[in-house]
Amino acid sequence: MNSPGLQNDNLRGGLLMTLAMAGFAAEDALMKLLSDSVSVGVLILLVGGFSTCVMLTVALRKGAPLFSRDFFHPAVLIRNLCEMLGAIGFVTALVMLSLQMASALFQTLPLAITMGAAVFLGEKVGWRRWTAVAVGFVGVLVILRPTGEGFDAFAAGASMLSVFALAARDLATRRIPARINSTSLAVWGMFSYMVAGALLLPFGAHGFDLPAPRDLALIVVIASCGLIGYLLLIAASRIGEISAIMPFRYTRLIFALGLGALLFGETPDLYMIIGSAMVVGSGVYTFLRERYHASKRAA
């Protein structure tokens, strides 16, 4: 039986996790809103630039090493490359798909991590979790309806690129030696975001034009939402039990549904609802099974 203190910590952790997901959902919605007047490359570059400056300030205050041989550690290089690919894929999908659909597809990230951990890290995954992973990706097909009208293979591919790239990023992070400073990793990751934007600049529909002052202000808000979400996510993870607060990560989809309806007039259809339920349900079940096996190993 959990003590009242632990229950309170879990409630606080769940609240912080929910607020973090609200920040990320707001970041996504505002990026999609701004993409009508600012090209994807410029958007990623400037959001990444602002975030890099903030994290750079934090790193300097902490005395974290910014120029180190550790930057060239294979796991760090893979992490940064995957960060770039994930940013390109997700923002591209965000622009081309509805906010609700892009957010629903992104919820497959935990399933992709489970697959990757089994295949590349040799972690044991039983048939129940493999079944849950399969059900989750069937949910992706239900959401996308690849045989239906309006299916965009490029946008769907961009979405899946972001999922698998970010899963690879998280798996690579597990292989990074503990001696490498986490703040340094954050700065390098944000800088990779900038590089991703720079790579997309030649393909932008709006060219290399600097955004209008109003758009620049909105870019600062977008980056701030992402940074606040990141800090709240860390705080939530430190306060509550992971098994208690993890389901609150899926509130990001709830916020995306609301913002999609409010800002873009999006309405989820039956396929979207069923597919999202399959993805979220599979993710929660997979995590609970992982916690169950972890507790058995610790016993």
Image: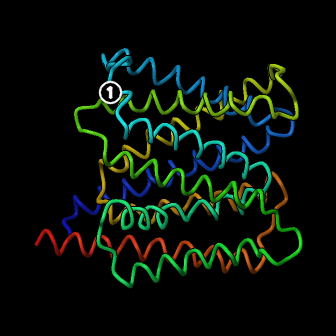
Foreground: 225 or 40? Answer: 40
Where residue 97 sits: x, y (%)? Answer: 78, 57
- The structure residue drawn at horizontal position 82% and vertical position 62%, both measured from the top left corner, is 152
- Residue at the left extreme of this rendering: 299
- The structure residue drawn at horizontal position 41% and vertical position 74%, both measured from the top left corner, is 286
> Quick check: 285 left or right of 217?
left
Q: Which residue is mark 1?
A: 70
Foreground: 116 or 16? Answer: 116
Amino acid type indicated by mark 1: Asp
Q: Is residue 79 above or below residue 106?
A: above
- The structure residue drawn at horizontal position 45% and vertical position 47%, both measured from the top left corner, is 169
Q: Is residue 264 above or below residue 71?
A: below
Q: Give the image's coloring scheme.
A: rainbow
- The structure residue drawn at horizontal position 50% and vertical position 22%, both measured from the top left corner, is 54
Where residue 148 sits: x, y (%)? Answer: 84, 77
Question: What crowding class fits label 1: few (fewer than 14 Cα within 10 Å), some (14-19), or many (20 or more)?
Answer: some
> Quick check: 288 left or right of 169?
left
**Please, what secondary structure does the residue beneath circle 1 have?**
helix
Res. 259 image quadrant: bottom right
- Image quadrant holding the C terminus, namely bottom left
Q: Is residue 105 above or below residue 124?
A: above
- Image quadrant holding the N terminus, namely bottom left
